[in-house]
Image (cartoon, rainbow, N blue to C red):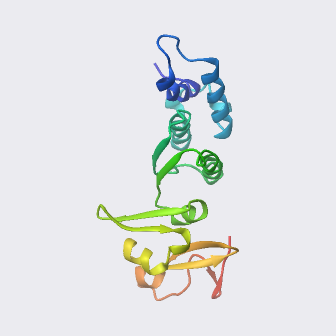
Amino acid sequence: MPFEVAYVVLTGRFPWIEGRKGYTPEDQAKVEEILKCFDLIELKQRPFNELSGGEKRRVLLARALVREARVILLDEPFSAVDLKHQHRIMRFLKKIGQKTLLIVVIHDLNLALRHFDRFLFFKRGKLVYDLSRAEIKADKLSRVFEVPIEIIACANQFMVEVSDEEVCGAGDPGGVGRIDGGELCL
C-alpha cells in the first residue's frame, strides 16, 4: 500500500512518540510547517511512489529534518532537487543550524561556498583540509579534486571554476564564468 507524502514526513516524528499515544497535534503541526517550508503542501496527499525524483528527495529531507535531531548528517541532499527548492531548503537549514549541528556532504562547491562556513575536504577517505570559507584557496581545491581550479570573486561571493584548457586540452581559456575574457557574475 503506497503511503501519502504527509504520512511519510510524519514518520520522522516517530522517535518522539510516547508509549501508545501515537502522533500528537504538535507532531501534525510540525509536519504542516515543514511541508510549507519545502513547498510540499500541494503534494501532501499524493502517494510517495508517484513523485518525481526531486519531489521524493524533498519529502525524505523533510522527514529527516522534522525529527529535530541535535545532529543531522545529510548526504548529497540536493541531488535531483531543482534550483528553487535547493535555496528554500538552504534557508531552512540556516534557520535550524543555529541550534543543530549540520554535517552536509555536498559536491557542488559553488553552492557550498555560498551557504556554508566550514569545510572538511576528504581524499581517499582521509581528512585533507579543515577550512573556514576565508581559508579556501584554488591550489588546495585543485589538490583535493585533482583538476586545476580557479576561484573568481564576484559581488562579495566566490565562484569555483575548473580550467577547461587543462581538463579538456582544448587550449581555450574561455568557459564557465568568462565572457570575452571578463568575469561573468550570476
In the displayed structure, 97 sits above or below 11; it is: below
Depth order, front residue of 48/88: 88
Q: Is residue 162 left or right of residue 144?
A: right
* Residue ID at (44%, 74%): 141
> Camera-side residue: 151 or 39?
151
On screen, residue 48 versus residue 34, left or right, reads left
Q: Position of residue 73 (x, y in %)?
A: 45, 46
Please determine whether, in this image, residue 38 is positioned above or below residue 43.
Answer: below
* Residue for point 56% across, 17% down: 23
Q: Which residue is located at x 48 percent, y 79 percent?
A: 138
In which quadrant of the rendered view does residue 44 lie?
top right
Residue 125 lies, with reference to residue 90, above or below; the image says below
Where is residue 181, by image quadrant?
A: bottom right
Q: Is residue 149 visible?
A: no
Q: Residue at x 58, y 44 (%)?
A: 99
Seen from the viewer's position, the closer of residues 127 and 62 is 127
Q: Height in image: 78 above or below 44? A: below
Quarter of the figure with the C terminus:
bottom right
Farthest top residue? 20
Q: Position of residue 33 (x, y in %)?
A: 67, 32
5 vs 12, nearest the viewer: 12
